[in-house]
Amino acid sequence: MLNEIRDLIAAHARPDLRTPVDGLLLSRVDDTEPEHSLTEPLLVLMAQGGKRLLLGDRVFEYRAGQFLLVTAALPVTGRFLAAPSLGAGLVLRPSAIAPLLLEAPAPRTPAGPAIATGDADADLLDAVTRLLRLLDRPADVPVLAPLIEREILWRLLTGPCGATLRQIGLADSSLSLVGRAIARIRENYAEPIRIAELARLCGLSASAFHRHFRAVTAMSPLQFQKRIRLQEARSLLLARPDDVAGVGHLVGYDSPSQFSREYRRLFGAPPGRDAARLRASAPALP
């Protein structure tokens, strides 16, 4: 089945990742350069190659025949382990997961951070294969795609990573509570963090908020905000490579030297030099 999945991804993958099946993404990556990005709730099945992700101080690795489960918006550093790498992704929607929780058995293990990896068993591979086959049968997509998506979610909920996926559909889970703070920090990353305010937003004490936040993100709120700031600065520098101090100020840094120091620590080069390298490697516009 993995060979068929690989062939279907290779045949249908596009630069924008999108497919005619809502929520299904396909990717082909031809380099192994490190990348810094913000995740979204997603299931990724690796069909060829592999990838290593760093979240805070935790490392997650998955290869062909394994999957990655991401249940929150998180700043991560990733590197593909081989090229080309082929993967299929499925957007994880709370509205699709919540109804299944009424039927799924209680998990045997507690939920860990908002990222997990595991081996794709035969049932999961079979369901993903049938979903990919719909790309060659567009008339079947409206009827069969939602049914296969439901089956894939069920396989995950009843598998070893079920406790992690359940967090998306539970209104009172650690992920749901901390998700409010994650959204607030992402929307207001340039403003100083007020822990007491974030804790009230989540309905938690300050100590409980810190505990839940680190359990989900593997970072403290301040570390999380710093990563968001620096990744946003990197995006801004592509358009403003000669205004390092101005970009640093825009993302919340009062000290240009602190901005440059922390930027270099994360991305491996000072802001100006890193921006020039990114611009040089970007594809030319047609």
Image (spheres, grey):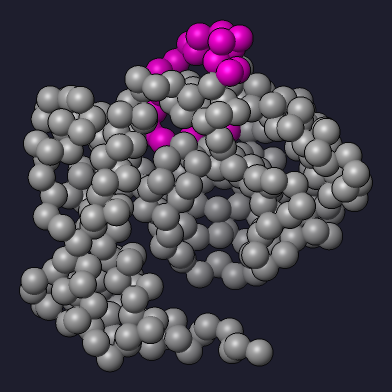
Q: Nearer the viewer, residue 275 or 40?
A: 40
Residue 204: give x, y in percent of width and height.
18, 25
Left or right: residue 210 versus residue 165 is left
Q: Nearer the viewer, residue 85 or 18?
A: 18
Residue at left 68%, top 57%?
A: 18
Residue at left 69%, top 40%?
A: 65
Q: Nearer the viewer, residue 81 or 105?
A: 105
Q: How many marks are shown on the rendered structure?
A: 0
Question: Residue 187 falls in which quadrant of the image?
Answer: bottom left
Residue at left 23%, top 30%?
A: 202
Q: Is residue 273 visible?
A: no
Q: Measured along the vertical axis of the image, is residue 231 above or below residue 114?
A: below
For the N terminus, the quadrant is top right
- 109 drawn magenta: yes
Question: Residue 199 falls in which quadrant of the image?
Answer: top left
The magenta segment: 99-118
Left or right: residue 89 versus residue 130 is left
- 30 drawn magenta: no
Q: Nearer the viewer, residue 203 or 58?
A: 203
Residue 209: give x, y in percent of width and height.
19, 30
Left or right: residue 90 versus residue 133 is left
Q: Measured along the vertical axis of the image, is residue 134 above or below residue 265?
A: above
Question: Residue 86 falls in which quadrant of the image?
Answer: bottom right
Question: What secondary structure prevails in the magenta region?
Answer: loop
Q: Measured along the vertical axis of the image, is residue 253 above or below residue 283?
A: above
Left or right: residue 232 versus residue 135 is left
Q: Is residue 221 visible?
A: yes
Residue 260: give x, y in percent of width and height.
19, 76
